[in-house]
Amino acid sequence: MKLQRTLAFTQRALAQFRHDRRTLAFILLMPLLMILIFGYTFGGDVQNVTVNLVNNDEGIPPTGLDTAPFPMGLHLGELVIDTFDNDTLILYTLEEPELAKQEVDKGKVWAAIIFPENFTETFRSYMLFTDLSARPIVEVYLDGSNPTIAGAVLKTVQQAIQTVLSDLAIQLNQTQVDIPIQLSASYAYGGGDIRFIDYFAPGVICFAIMMVTIMITIILFVNERRNGTLQRLLVSPASEADIVIGYALAFSVIGIFQSIVVLLAAILLFGITIVGNVLLALLVVLLLAFGHQGLGILLSAGARNELQAIQFIPLILFPSILLAGLFWPIESIPSYLQPLSYLIPLRYGIDAERSIMLRGWGIGEIWIDIVILIVFSLLTLGGSILLLKRRK
């Protein structure tokens, strides 16, 4: 090996980057972009969880008697509510427990926290008579389809109860164990036994379809354009719509087979149960494949070769991974970044798949996600057809 010859190859390789400044910028700036995105989104605490609050607790009025446990009166429900972490929970006050629960069933809020009318009175009775059968109960009705959010809600309520009990124990000169408040949790979906893999699997299916479709489409169209294949197709009797829709159907078929493989692996290896309609879940996958195939064609127009084409892939994948709720809830993303998630189609695919697989929802509940995915597909595929017409 001659040093001079080796250095000549080194110089040649570096010269390529000098003439391709976009690739050089990509190499230098992409690691910075990745660390910024991961740093601001990864491992954040769950925040801004929407919760219905029903506080029917009537409290107890002041007695003025020094011998009574609470001569100045007590409203235990308000004490617990005032102790809630306002960064974690966004509270919407309602009066009817059933209405609060119905909104959980419909997916409008993540939980309903209910304090009964006799909450404080039951607490006082326990303190006076040590009646173990009469313990004050806080009811929490949860959407358990997202175990991270459900856990955050329960943790927030439990911490608030523990804080209030500690303060009361000091006032009453008793141990905290002697003045318990019972937390009763029930679930609209999941029954509290949903595992992380159950929550994670629908997102993995959507992400796999998106990643494979957009990668293959970008690289394939750049390669066919460079080899002249695309130009020959454009001068053939086939229309631009025939070409685009044909490719879209091909990738959709591949995506469906991928989804079937992933679903079977999830069911057989990890014991995942699909509550909803499997065909509806496959329809969501089909729409994702359509839309990202069109996006891949649009992005391929800005690339002269495969190397430049690959540069687009991280720009699509990383925001989708981090901002679409794939690994962690969107509620754990900083609030100033959360609006960006509405611009990412993968978010709607993941939301629809999880609603189908975990909640058992039908098209009547996820129609908004379906419409958004259809619009995304029409825009990207329509843009791809117009792009090919322009090239022709």
Image: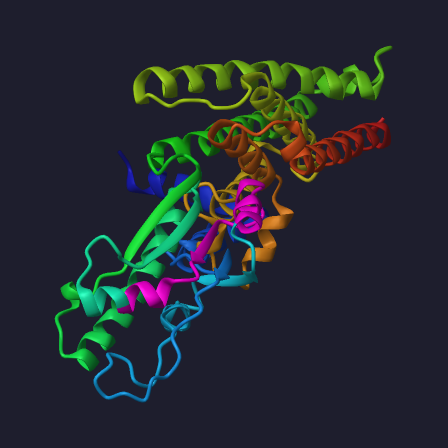
Q: Is residue 8 visible?
A: no
How is the rendered protein coloured? rainbow
Residue 23 spot, x, y in % from top left: 54, 46
Q: x and y percent of residue 115 in the render? A: 42, 60
**220 shown above or below 366:** above
Residue drawn at point x = 22 percent, y = 61 percent: 180
Residue 107, magenta (yes or no): yes
Q: Which residues are magenta?
A: 98-124
The question of residue 287 being in magenta is answered with no
Tell me the residue at 28%/71% (across/down): 164
135 to 233, vertically: above or below: below
Q: Is residue 212 above or below residue 267?
A: below
Q: Quadrant of the N terminus?
A: top left
Regarding residue 64, the answer to whether it shows in the image is yes
Q: Nearer the viewer, residue 78 or 359?
A: 78
* Circle count: 0
Quarter residue 376 falls in? top right
Of residue 89 and residue 334, the one placed in the foreground of this image is 89
Depth order, front residue of 203/307: 203
Query: In this image, 364 relative to 134: left or right?
Result: right
Q: Residue at x 44, y 62 (%)?
A: 117
Where the C terminus falls, by quadrant? top right
Rendered image quadrant of residue 307: top right
The x, y position of residue 30, in whole percent, is 48, 51
Res 168 quadrant in image: bottom left
Q: Position of residue 227 (x, y in %)?
A: 66, 20
- Front-lying residue, 305 or 52: 52
